[in-house]
């Protein structure tokens, strides 16, 4: 099988020349400056940088170049992946301010604060993963999603664009083809920009409320804010997939929402949207069927919203196994032929690799029987899709052999208090009234940080969490404001008696997966518990959230871990080459860029969030010392 063997420096040069030809700059200009203009680096969500000034040989000398404090701490964390355009960095703060910084110094250029009377938050998450940049001649705009509003800002000043929407913003609760009632939609990931079209999904409640809003995907005019099209992720009568739901579901069912962001093939005019679970996400008694387009990779015509193809990775979801990150658009070598693909990582630890034109799997996928629910009224789907290659990169299921071996005491505690109580479990174990261990859990496998793809080698890098949880279905209260007889008792964290996970190590991993061959090249522990480290234990891995980036310098940069460290790994071996103790957890994806000939790596140190560590308010940029 043929492989790419292009040297990193040559690949970077080719890319720089291509960028210059497109933008009109000189090669010398581009060699001194390199942007990160889109969430996760580019429309393909590659999280790849062709820069190599920082490399294996010198990364140990990396030092902090500057730090910017947002001064608005919020325990909900900073998940922002900074966007860098022509030396200006655009970020978002814990309180959802949009901020422009000098990318070389961290100096504040402007800050936009969403008006409270126009963005009341309505009880929804104040999480944001970054902004989108668009330009047409001298008209440069930042599109900022804050709660249930889409704001258009002048990229030079941060001021609202008055002729966009309603004086500079669009109310995202309008235009859903259904009243969102008292449960608004919000948007946590940046919009996708195609030509003069803005494409976005939404975050919706997925609990037991009677009228959760639908997760329909919409497009807006970048100049005016007018809605251009809508795709119904819960199909309306006459639309494909309508028969996978009860007849009236299009009026009442919620979720099936593309909250994680999307990827774009601009040449083909296709946008690829990963969707989450339908609501309620732990009891589907009111939604028998496969429930298209929940838990689905959707390929849509970016100009019209027309469905080109779809691939559902979980049928009739009961585990909250959302597709939590944009897919990576990749080119791989299969049987000596270059194939354009869509690589989707998942919370289950499955990686699906699909043909970009048709959605057909490039590696086989099998529909395998799974256990069936005994909850009254529940109709579990009889099979689920399992990729044959690559193998799972996260631990699936919980058997006796999976019980922690950290200490004999820890093993005995888990055996008596967890395993003997709940029993063994497999992937897609249906929730029961006696309780179950769920592995991976709803925050397990890979969450919104997603993966990084190296076009030089065909290797995809992805982090995963391997900490189980326990769930039990209980009878709903008689006065509950919904119609479900059985509901989950919440996502219960389970520990070994000493505060550590109940499963064997590693509890978090960084994985290198060869998409040409469909094999895991290497897997290493990601993160450590300092108290175990002090006892002489090797890295155990930790729960992790936030994604990696890979560079032509031979490095994978990632924060994500509960030990609040920022690390650089050798992309060929998985060896740690550099680490830095952040002031708060780096629960975000880094960005890599170059200004005036100096390469930087920047990450948000926001802490808090799902890992539950102390909050922070920093953006920290690292570079080699100036000599």
Image (tube, rainbow, N blue to C red):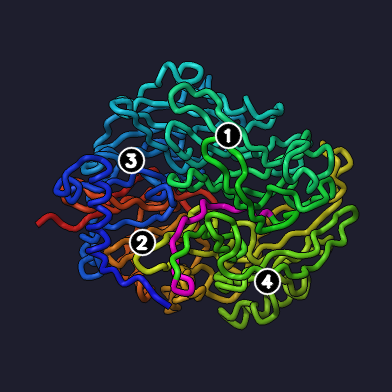
Q: Which residue is mark 3?
A: 69
Foreground pick, 608 / 427: 427
Residue designated by label 2: 550
- Disc with the residue nearer the chain's start (3 vs 4): 3
- Nearer the observer: mark 1 or 2; the answer is 1
* As drawn, 28 above or below 252: below
Query: Nearer the viewer's eye, disc 3 or disc 4?
Result: 4
Q: Are marks 1 and 2 in contact (CB under 8 Å)?
A: no
Identify the residue shown where x is 74% and y is 70%. 368
**Label 2 vs label 4: CA separation?**
30 Å
Q: Secondary structure at mark 2?
A: strand
The residue carrying pointer 3 sits among few (fewer than 14), some (14 to 19) or many (20 or more) residues within 10 Å by Cα, namely some
Mark 2 vs 4: CB contact within 8 A = no
- Whichever of labels 2 and 4 marks the residue nearer the N terminus, that label is 4
Q: Where's residue 518, x and y in %?
A: 51, 73
Q: Earlier in the sequence, mark 2 or mark 3?
A: 3
Residue 348 position within the rendered picture, expressed as x and y whole percent measured from the top left = 62, 63
Question: Does residue 325 show up magenta in the picture?
Answer: yes
Residue position for label 1: 218
Q: Is residue 428 visible?
A: yes
């Amino acid at each position: 099988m043929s492989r790419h063997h292009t040297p990193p420096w040559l690949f970077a040069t080719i890319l720089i020349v291509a960028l210059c030809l497109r933008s009109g700059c000189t090669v010398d200009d581009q060699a001194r400056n390199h942007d990160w203009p889109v969430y996760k680096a580019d429309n393909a969500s590659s999280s790849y940088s062709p820069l190599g000034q920082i490399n294996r040989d010198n990364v140990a000398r990396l030092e902090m170049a500057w730090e910017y404090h947002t001064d608005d701490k919020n325990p909900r964390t900073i998940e922002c992946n900074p966007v860098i355009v022509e030396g200006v960095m655009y970020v978002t703060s814990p309180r959802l301010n949009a901020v422009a910084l000098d990318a070389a110094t961290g100096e504040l250029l402007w800050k936009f604060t969403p008006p409270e009377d126009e963005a009341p938050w309505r009880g929804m998450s104040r999480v944001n993963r970054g902004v989108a940049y668009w330009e047409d001649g001298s008209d440069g705009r930042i599109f900022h999603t804050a709660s249930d509003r889409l704001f258009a800002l002048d990229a030079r000043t941060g001021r609202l664009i008055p002729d966009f929407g309603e004086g500079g913003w669009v109310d995202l609760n309008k235009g859903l083809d259904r009243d969102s009632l008292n449960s608004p939609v919000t948007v946590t990931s940046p919009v996708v920009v195609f030509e003069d079209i803005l494409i976005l999904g939404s975050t919706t409640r997925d609990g037991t409320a009677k009228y959760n809003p639908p997760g329909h995907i919409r497009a807006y005019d970048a100049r005016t804010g007018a809605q251009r099209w809508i795709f119904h992720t819960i199909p309306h009568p006459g639309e494909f997939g309508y028969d996978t739901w009860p007849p009236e579901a299009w009026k009442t069912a919620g979720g099936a929402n593309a909250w994680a962001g999307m990827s774009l093939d601009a040449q083909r005019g296709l946008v690829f949207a990963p969707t989450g679970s339908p609501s309620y996400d732990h009891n589907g008694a009111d939604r028998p069927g496969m429930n298209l387009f929940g838990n689905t990779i959707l390929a849509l015509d970016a100009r019209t919203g027309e469905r080109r193809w779809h691939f559902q990775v979980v049928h009739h979801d009961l585990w909250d196994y959302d597709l939590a990150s944009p897919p990576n658009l990749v080119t791989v070598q299969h049987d000596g032929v270059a194939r354009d693909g869509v690589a989707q990582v998942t919370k289950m630890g499955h990686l699906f690799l699909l043909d970009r034109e048709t959605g057909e799997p490039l590696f086989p996928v099998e529909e395998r029987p799974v256990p069936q629910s005994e909850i009254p009224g529940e109709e579990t789907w009889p099979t689920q899709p399992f990729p044959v290659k690559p193998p799972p990169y996260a631990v699936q299921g919980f058997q006796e052999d999976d019980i922690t071996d950290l200490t004999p005491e820890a093993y005995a505690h888990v055996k008596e208090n967890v395993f003997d109580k709940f029993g063994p479990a497999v992937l897609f174990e249906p929730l029961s009234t006696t309780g179950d261990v769920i592995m991976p859990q709803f925050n397990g496998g890979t969450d919104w940080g997603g993966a990084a793809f190296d076009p030089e080698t065909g290797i995809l890098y992805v982090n995963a969490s391997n900490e189980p949880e326990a769930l039990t279905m209980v009878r709903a209260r008689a006065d509950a404001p919904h119609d479900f007889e059985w509901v989950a008792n919440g996502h219960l964290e389970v520990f070994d008696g000493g505060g550590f996970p109940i499963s064997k190590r590693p509890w978090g991993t960084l994985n290198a997966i060869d998409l040409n061959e469909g094999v895991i090249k290497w897997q290493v522990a990601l993160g450590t518990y300092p108290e175990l480290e002090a006892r002489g234990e090797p890295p155990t891995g930790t729960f992790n959230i936030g994604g990696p980036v890979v560079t032509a310098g031979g490095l994978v940069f990632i924060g994500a871990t509960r030990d609040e460290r920022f690390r650089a790994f050798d992309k060929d071996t998985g060896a740690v080459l550099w680490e830095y103790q952040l002031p708060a957890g780096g629960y975000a994806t880094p960005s890599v860029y170059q200004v005036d000939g100096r390469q930087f790596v920047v990450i948000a140190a926001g802490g808090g969030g799902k890992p539950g560590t102390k909050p922070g308010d920093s953006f920290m940029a690292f570079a080699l010392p100036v000599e």
